[in-house]
Image (cartoon, rainbow, N blue to C red):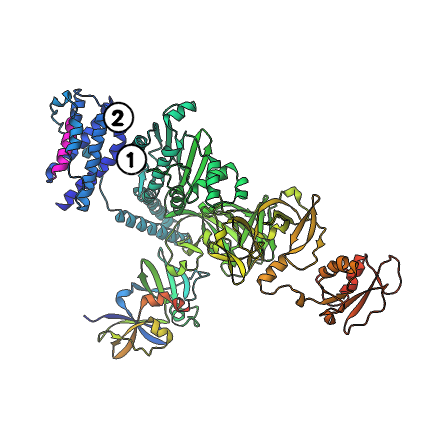
Amino acid sequence: MDDLINDFIAETREMLEALSGEIVAWEAMPDDRARLDEIFRFVHTVKGNSGFFDLPRIRALSHAAEDALSAVRSGARNADARLVSAVLAIIDRLAELVDALETGEALASADDSALIGALSAQGPSETAEAEAAPAHSSARASSRTVRLPVELLDRMMSGVSDLVLARNELSRRIRASGDTEMLAAFDRVSVTVADLRDSITRTRMQRIDNLFAPLPRMVRDVCGQTGKLVALEIDGGDVEIDREMLEMIRDPLTHIIRNAIDHGIESPAERRRAGKKETGCLRVCARQAGNQILLEIADDGAGIDGDKLVNRAVAAGVVTAERADRLTEAEKHALVFEAGLSTAAQVTDLSGRGVGMDVVRANVERIGGIVEIESRAGQGVVLTLRVPLTLTIIPALTVVADGQVYAIPRSAIEEIVRVKGGSVRVESVGGAAFATVRGRRLPLVHLRHSLGRPPCPDPTGQSLVLLRPAGADLYALAVDDIHDHEELVVKPAAPAVMAAGLYAGTTIADDGKPVLLLDPPGIAAKAGLALHRRSASGEAVPAPAPEAASGPAALLFRTLAGAMRLVPVAAVQRIEDVRPEAVQLSAGRLHVALGETLLPLEGCGLSAPDRPMRLLRLSDGRSEVAYGFADVVDILPLPEELIPASEPGEVRGVVLIGGEQAELLDLHWLFARQAGRPAGAAARPVCAIPAGDPFMDAILRPLVESAGYSVVAAGAPGSEFASIVIASAEADEVAPTPGARLVRVRASAEGEGDSVHRYDRDALLAALAGDSQPKRRRRRG
Amino acid sequence: MAELLLIVRIAGERIALPAADVESVVEIEALTPVPGAAGHVAGLAALRSRVLTVIDCLASLDPTRRLPDDAAEAVMAVVDGHPYALLVEAVEDVVEASGERQPAAASLAGGWRRIGRATIEAEGDLLLLADVEALIAGPAREAA
């Protein structure tokens, strides 16, 4: 008996789903006899079935609906909106009752008489006799289906996956044996196995219709609540998609459609004013493109108000105001996907609670999909969901590192380039590697390094796989060789393997060897590349225009204090926006928290900023330093002429850019500071200069310092440690300092003896370099 | 009915594994290394169309030691749906226990304490009954 009840529940549910589209279509065209018949058949079947089980409420409801519809069928009554609503209400109640039947819970609303009353409140037509129900059960007869537990399908799928792998292995062995007769016989088996795999894969596939069927009803309901008029167009319902995938995109799709109606499409009055038809158009269309399903949801509403969104984003601290100014239109629209933002002025029951599109994106990306948005002001929004067809068999690229084969899911691969090719430049700065591919500068990760293997002996023979992990930034993965494209049956890896943080699963290649499937986000994370949303909280560092190449590229930016500074692009790993609360004074210095990493923060002095700011993430390949700044001005070749700074500090010197001065960051100093070895005075050789001489103090001193000396005034404390004493050639004899060399400078260009002209820079540096180990050496000549 | 035990050799000692936890005894041919994984994960091996995660039981017992490269005898077990091959020095025999499980002595040394679940008597010897899951988990948990 329980089985029968369960069958009744399942069958009723199935019919309900199939029906919801029919009802709305029928409402639009009450004369459509075919639709009416469908609905009639449903209530009739439910009524008949409920008679078997003692279910009086279901029976009474379906009976009443059957009567009313039967009157319409006989022409005694018109299908007006009121009738349709009443029938819909009954169908809803039936669905509730069926649910309650399954869970065994009592239904809160125990009285159905109002619903039945609404149906029969129509005066005269009610007298019409219920037509004798046609004795058919075509709803059941027409669909020759078997109901199977989903686990059984999954088991079949994994069984056939094993079979495919076993086939591959056998095929390889037979080939190796050279027995052609056997091979011919085996090929038949092989073809059969392939067919079997295809059909079993298909058993897990469902028409995307299943996803679309409830939409007309939902659109109708949402329109009813919002007072909007929307015509729904559905296309591509025959596209098939993996059952699991279908479930995964059900909620995102529902949300997108509610959103589109609630604040995409305007009210009829607004639409009239805008010169549009009163009825908005919502188009949902699915199509298969390779091994992806494209799902497009387009409305012809007002579009996204990019500026409004930006204002909210700034208010919510998602982006800084400065950053907001430079967002492209597309970037502004992509802010829709940031958590906590909504353009709905009023929070409605349906949407606008700010828990929407971010969840949509998260869900879609979790199954390896992508969401894209395109908006045109006044013309509407197109949202495109791209999701893979299935989860278990994936197309992959196999690559080689240190003699071992690994697989990379092809969905994450954007491009493959050879290092040798002219379009690629690989640079390494302080251990941080970058690849410039056709003007795009990308962080470079060596797969061998990630795997803890020795570096490749022939780096120029390597290839770069450009990877874009779901929703994150592009990076280049250097591999020794590209092996092949293969369709792989992926199996989950054991926890002990997953713990490495580099793999997404295991599989067996056609040669029968186990192969590890690499996890692109995991590799990036392990390599220290933080993965970020492209839209708002990070951006790839733009590469300089190719023609602007002479010196190494430098990034010109404005500091928080408004000064112009430069930093070599190669050292900049990323640019990010941070909120003030991410910054804290701890252990006597500022640190900024970026996701899971904590970085020392420079560029802000010692006071935590009180508003969102941008960060340069500087890397020397091993450690990182964050440098707070206001905005990026330009990227240009680093000028060769540098006027060194007078004091060791975060500025190495000053350069001239287009007539303006800019300070060049001293990366060495910044990183040395992090390493706990301040490049302070004590570590440097000391040079004593005459006290109170304006030339010496203001002009010569910076030069000496830039040569690597700590400068003290003669006679001042510390001067006794001087290894060089500078004296004016015109001055009196200087008392010799033990262990120090004397350098005499003269004011006049022509002179004699061992003195050096004070503006002969090279000679001065040479004289200084004669001793100790200053940082920069130049020889005269 | 007495418990069935599979006797294997790890670090020169005879160790009992509950036969109920063991799927089969396999020969491991070629190993695919898993860079970045814990030291006791010897690699991956294909068994028909399944991918086995191969555990070096000696390394699991004592992180400073490893089985020789030619070790091939392994015990296959499935834990949480994942197939594993536990590589041991030798697989000896399946025997019937001649007594009940007894709590393992607290005085077991280092790694043995981690993998030992109980002691059990078989063929007149007192054997340590090892825990398959503990062998698979390895020493990582303690080190972390």
Q: Which of marks 2 and 1 is nearer the N terminus?
A: 2
**Badge 2: how crowded within 10 Å, few (<14), some, or many (20+)?**
some
Say whether residue A688 is left or right of residue A12. Answer: right
Where, by quadrant of the figure, is residue A226 drawn? top left
Q: Residue at x 25, y 26 (%)?
A: A26
Q: What element carries label 1?
A: loop
Q: A37 above or below A690?
A: above
Say whether residue A198 is left or right of residue A8. Answer: right
Q: Which of A296 and A710 is in front in this view?
A: A710
Residue A64 horizontal/vertical position (percent): 14, 30
| Magenta residues, dominant SS class | helix
Where, by quadrant of the figure, is residue A680 drawn? bottom right
Q: How far apart are marks 2 and 1 (CA)?
A: 15 Å
Residue assigned mark 2: A27
Residue A354 horizontal/vertical position (percent): 39, 42
Mark 2 on the same chain as mark 1: yes
